[in-house]
Image (cartoon, rainbow, N blue to C red):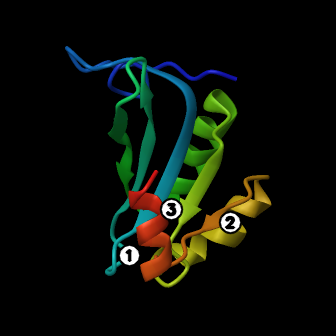
Amino acid sequence: MACHWQGRLDGGGAAGGAPVSGQVAFGCAISEDRKSGAIVAAGRSDSGKILVDLAPFYDHPRMLVARMDELFLKHDPVAVVVNPKSQSATLVKQLADVGIVVVAMKPMTSRSRTENSST
C-alpha cells in the first residue's frame, strides 16, 4: 500500500512540503516527565530522499494510542517503533491491545554502523 502525504500526515499539508510515496514508518515517544507524547513519521520522497514528519501528534500521552491507531489504519505502516528503555516502553502493551505490533529499537553496534554506512 502506498502512503501519500504533503508535509503532514493529517492532510494539513505544509506549503512546499514534499509528497511521500511508498512505505512509511512511525516512531512513538513519551517524555521523561510523562507530560507529553509524540509520534513521528518517516518515508521517502518521490526523488528518494528520506523525509521525517514531526507533525502527526504532539499531546498528552493518554491520547497517543488513539492517534497511533488512527494513523495505523489510515497509512498501513511497515513499522511502529518505540524505545523499550524509555518511558515509551509503557506503550507496547497498550498498542498491542488495539492490534498494533511494535518494533523495539535496538542499540546500534559498531558492526551495524559499518554495515549501514556502506549501503
Proximity of marks 1 and 2: CB atoms separated by less than 8 Å: no
- Disc 3 designates what residue? 62
Question: Could you say which is closer to the camera, residue 62 or residue 54?
Answer: 54
Q: CA distance from mark 2 to mark 3?
A: 10 Å
Spot the residue most to the bottom: 85
Proximity of marks 3 and 1: CB atoms separated by less than 8 Å: no
Mark 1 lies on a secondary structure that is: loop
Counting every numbered tag in the picture gives 3
Question: Could you say which is closer to the camera, residue 97 or residue 50?
Answer: 50
Q: Is residue 97 visible?
A: yes
The x and y percentages for residue 36 are: 34, 64
Residue 59 versus residue 96 in the image, above or below: above
- Disc 1 designates what residue? 34
Question: Could you say which is closer to the camera, residue 65 or residue 26?
Answer: 26
Q: CA distance from mark 3 to mark 1?
A: 10 Å
The x and y percentages for residue 62 are: 50, 62
Q: CA distance from mark 1 to mark 2?
A: 15 Å
Residue 3 versus residue 26 in the image, above or below: above
- Disc 2 designates what residue? 94
